[in-house]
Amino acid sequence: MNNITEGLKQIHALSIQGNYELRIDMEDFENSTAYAQYGTFGVGLFSVDPDEDGYPLTVGDYSGNAGDSLLKHNGMKFTTKDQDNDHSENNCASFYHGAWWYRNCHTSNLNGQYLRGQHTSYADGIEWSSWTGWQYSLKYSEMKMRPAREADHK
């Protein structure tokens, strides 16, 4: 079992225990910061066998100042170089150099190549397109999940 699958299994095991939210913090090479928060988050929430189903992403209820570059990926299975689930004729994980919940291919990819800010290649860095565009790779990103506050889900 590889590290990606193990991580997805752990996120799935947590996210099926109740309502979770996701916060993504990002920083660019000019030390500007932004965040995207999702009041609804899970991986493989509705799967009988999430490994067989590809660990589909569930996100909703966006707030933040980075723009919503994850909505396009909602409901998508996780794609790696050896598991192509992305609805594209090319394997997006191979083409954009990182595994992710691609949908023909992406508006975000926090597992892309670590490039240093502005670059000339297209969309293959650590991308959050609604904040920095397609030819800028982030210096830092962190995805954090926690149980959702009950007041948010009543």
Image: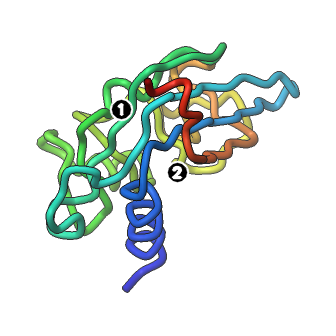
Q: Is residue 18 above or below residue 74?
A: below
Q: Secondary structure at mark 2?
A: loop
Which residue lies at the image location 32% right of the left edge and 61% below the top edge?
Answer: 80
**Residue at the disc numbered 1:** 106
Q: Is residue 3 above or below residue 48?
A: below
Q: Position of residue 109 (x, y in %)?
A: 47, 40
Quick one: 57 or 141, which is closer to the camera? Answer: 57
Which residue lies at the image location 86% right of the left edge and 25% below the top edge?
Answer: 30
> Colour scheme of this structure image?
rainbow
Q: Position of residue 133 (x, y in %)?
A: 55, 18
Judged from this view, the residue extending furthest toward the right is 31
Q: Amino acid at mark 1?
A: His
**Residue at the disc numbered 2:** 111
Judged from this view, the residue extending furthest toward the bottom is 1
Badge 1 or badge 2: first in the primary sequence: 1
Q: Is residue 130 visible?
A: no
Q: Position of residue 40 (x, y in %)?
A: 43, 33
Image mark for residue 41: none
Which residue lies at the image location 37% right of the left edge and 24% below the top edge?
Answer: 71
Q: Amino acid at mark 2?
A: Asn
